[in-house]
């Protein structure tokens, strides 16, 4: 065991002398957290909507006033009035408008006749996010418009009331669990991938191989040394990330302890996976070349940035075997829901089994000779 | 009892026969040199003896242990200095040695004592706590020699110990090796490209070519085995006519080249040819302005046994030359 410690000691001493690794593996995920968090999380405002009222009857004016009220309060829309429908359509096609609200000529007559009148929202659907924001507000507005002015004595219409279990979760907080896992991954990729292969190419491993160290001691030493570095960046991220993302009660000691356990388990899983990938590699280009690909293939299908429910079948398969999925799910429970360990026992079990499988395969494939 | 015993040792990489049924033994206390052109199989042989590469067939025993079946016992009994500089640049000299002492399982108290003593022996005491990245090539090599001895091995393997060092550092490394060998009762097996190094350090030299042993003896005997043992270079003030033919008939002359009044004579017996030359010059009233007699060097031996042709051959690219590695110098 003292030999395993010698490998860990060497790695950690080097790590302390040139802390590039820890800085890269902490800064990159933090930058991503902040930029992605604010780039995707905001509420869409000031969509330019052309209003073409071809009716001018009282119900039409009422609808237009309601629209104006939304524009003035929620500021989702910025209305621009057109008398010429053709001009409004031209401007929509030329990209000067996000949508056109058209109240057709017979609207008021149909309202008064109770004949299901239509209002048209013609939208620029190349921008999905803006068009669905527009649709959302419009469809909320119309029931209010349809409601009878005086409430009926008996109403048979069932309504859906929504109870939110947790406080509002902004996107940056939704992103934080993935970011923590990402920082552990980057650290594993640099420490267990790039530096590991560089050392091998430089002949540093030859120095180990001529000593009476066993294959298992070597692998354990490399893995624990890599995991120690990954744990450090994970710990920085759970603290700094919680503060930056504005998690309520960010330094709750019990949650911190649970997260520490999960950080250790995730670090072991990712470093042993990296070790398995790199066990027969000797070209220093390889870890650099697959860095970006691994990052994309593991991070995005994990549910870290978008719910997995929306994925096509093949991506769901990736998500099922991807250790990121379980790591991200575990951190989501701990950070966003403040659950206990029982809630994430499935995630922990998967990650432990994954670690054992990777380590065993790596030990079988590892060559004690050059 | 031999410290190294090699019997029909063979290593084959696919179709390529790197080491071809080698046989030799190294006695305890010997300094044994492996010479050979690039790609001759020296490094493969060294790697088999240090348990880094398993042999294809044949056996090798180091300090009585089989390199294939008792690899860990071999590892515990040998010190190895690879060709590449493998010290950790970010760590200090003491830290580098301490890590290795721990890898060999040396207890703390002894570790501290041994490291201090070894650093003194290689004259690095005053730089003990400085990071190795600030060391010169010669200092790094000396540190590696000290590191290789940290577990007090019986046999020491060095792969091109002075390649890339300046002349002063080379001499310093030689002197250190000679002293350490004597004080610690070591058997040394080393590879080298430098004939002067082999000549100065080695008790016996094996010349390896195409994976085979082409010569094995002491430097003196190897030099004696090459025809034309001495080179005489003589110049005259005014060489008499037909002088070339006179010189050619001198005793033991193997070959003669003339360039104006300067003559270069290969002789099988330098002293005898020299005496006869002086006498012939006196008889002919020719004035000798300069005369030198040189011994055959190991360079001549090397060329004699391995031939002169360049060995251009492709080899597997080394990962150590990758331009993608992080610069840590």
Image (spheres, coloured by chain):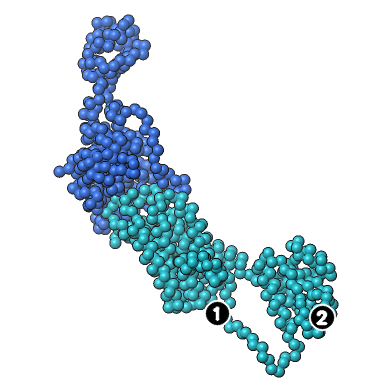
Chain colours: A cyan, B blue
Q: Is residue A125 above or below residue B208?
A: below
Residue bearing mark 1: A166
- Neighbours of disc 2 within 10 Å: few (<14), some (14-19), many (20+): many
Give the number of the mark in front: 1 or 2: 2
Tell me which residue sits at (63%, 70%) in the image: A42
Please identify the residue farthest to the left as the structure is shown: B1
Along the line of sight, the residue nearer the viewer: A80 or A256:
A80
List x then y, in percent, for residue A236: 47, 66
Distance (Cα) linking label 1 and label 2: 44 Å
Report the disc number at residue B70.
none
List x then y, in percent, for residue A321: 45, 66
Mark 1 or mark 2: name the one nearer the start of the chain.
2
Chain ID at mark 2 = A
Along the line of sight, the residue nearer the viewer: A121 or B204:
A121
- Describe residue B15's horizontal placement relative to residue A86 as left or right: left
Looking at the rendered structure, the secondary structure element under dot 1 is loop
- Neighbours of disc 1 within 10 Å: few (<14), some (14-19), many (20+): few
Locate the N terminus of chain A and report the quarter of the image it occupies.
Answer: bottom left
Q: Is residue B56 above or below residue A212?
A: above
Residue bearing mark 2: A108
Tell me whether the residue at label 1 lies in contact with that at label 2, contact meaning CB atoms closer than 8 angstroms: no
């Amino acid at each position: 065991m003292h030999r395993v410690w010698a490998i860990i000691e060497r790695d950690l001493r080097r790590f302390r002398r040139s802390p590039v690794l820890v800085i890269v593996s902490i800064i990159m995920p933090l930058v991503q957290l902040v930029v992605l968090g604010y780039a995707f999380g905001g509420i869409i405002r000031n969509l330019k909507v052309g209003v073409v009222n071809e009716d001018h009857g009282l119900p039409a004016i009422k609808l237009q006033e309601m629209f104006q009220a939304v524009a003035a309060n929620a500021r989702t829309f910025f209305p621009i009035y057109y008398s010429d429908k053709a001009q409004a359509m031209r401007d929509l096609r030329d990209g000067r408008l996000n949508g056109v609200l058209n109240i057709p000529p017979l609207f008021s007559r149909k309202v008064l006749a109770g004949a299901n009148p239509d209002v048209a929202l013609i939208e620029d659907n190349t921008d999905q996010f803006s068009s669905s924001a527009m649709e959302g507000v419009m469809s909320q507005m119309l029931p209010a418009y349809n409601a009878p002015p005086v409430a009926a004595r008996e109403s048979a219409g069932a309504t859906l009331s929504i109870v939110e279990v947790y406080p509002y979760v902004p996107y940056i907080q939704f992103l934080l669990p993935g970011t923590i896992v990402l920082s552990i991954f980057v650290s594993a990729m640099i420490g267990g991938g790039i530096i590991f292969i560089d050392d091998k190419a430089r002949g540093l491993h030859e120095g180990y191989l001529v000593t009476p160290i066993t294959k298992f001691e070597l692998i354990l030493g490399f893995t624990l040394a890599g995991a120690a570095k990954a744990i450090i960046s994970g710990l920085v991220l759970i603290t700094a990330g919680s503060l930056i993302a504005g998690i309520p009660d960010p330094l709750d000691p019990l949650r911190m302890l649970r997260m520490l356990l999960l950080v250790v388990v995730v670090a072991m899983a990712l470093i042993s996976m990296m070790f398995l990938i790199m066990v027969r590699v000797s070209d220093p280009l390889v870890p650099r070349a697959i860095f970006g690909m691994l990052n994309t293939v593991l991070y995005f299908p994990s549910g870290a940035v978008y719910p997995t429910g929306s994925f096509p079948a093949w991506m769901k398969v990736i998500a099922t075997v991807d250790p990121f999925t379980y790591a991200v799910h575990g951190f989501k429970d701990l950070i966003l829901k403040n659950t206990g360990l029982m809630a994430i026992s499935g995630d922990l079990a998967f990650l432990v089994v994954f670690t054992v499988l990777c380590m065993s395969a790596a030990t079988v494939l590892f060559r004690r000779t050059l | 009892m031999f410290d190294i015993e090699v019997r029909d040792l063979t290593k084959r990489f696919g179709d390529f026969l790197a080491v071809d049924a080698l046989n030799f033994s190294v006695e305890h206390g010997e300094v044994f040199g492996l010479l050979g052109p690039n790609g001759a199989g020296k490094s493969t042989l060294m790697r088999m003896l240090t348990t880094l590469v398993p042999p294809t067939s044949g056996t090798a025993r180091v300090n009585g242990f089989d390199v294939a079946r008792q690899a860990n016992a071999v590892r515990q009994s040998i010190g190895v200095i690879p060709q590449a500089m493998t010290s950790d640049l970010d760590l200090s000299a003491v830290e580098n040695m301490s890590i290795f002492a721990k890898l060999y399982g040396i207890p703390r108290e002894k570790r501290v004592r041994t490291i201090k003593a070894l650093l003194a022996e290689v004259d690095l005491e005053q730089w003990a706590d400085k990071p190795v990245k600030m060391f010169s090539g010669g200092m790094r090599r000396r540190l590696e020699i000290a590191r290789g001895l940290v577990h007090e091995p019986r046999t020491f393997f060095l792969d091109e110990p002075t390649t890339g060092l300046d002349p002063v550092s080379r001499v310093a490394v030689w002197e250190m090796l000679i002293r350490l060998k004597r004080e610690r009762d070591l058997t040394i097996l080393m590879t080298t490209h430098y004939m002067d190094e082999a000549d100065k350090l080695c008790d016996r030299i094996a010349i390896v070519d195409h994976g085979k042993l082409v010569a094995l003896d002491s430097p003196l005997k190897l030099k004696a085995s090459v025809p034309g043992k001495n080179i005489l270079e003589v110049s005259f003030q005014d060489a008499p006519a037909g002088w070339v033919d006179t010189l050619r008939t001198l005793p033991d002359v193997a070959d003669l080249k003339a360039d104006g009044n300067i003559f270069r004579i290969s002789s099988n017996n330098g002293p005898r040819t020299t005496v006869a030359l002086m006498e012939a010059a006196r008889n002919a009233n020719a004035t000798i302005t300069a005369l030198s007699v040189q011994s055959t060097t190991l360079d001549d031996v090397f060329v004699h046994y391995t031939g002169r042709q360049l060995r251009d051959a492709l080899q597997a690219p080394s990962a150590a030359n990758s331009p993608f590695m992080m610069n840590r110098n």
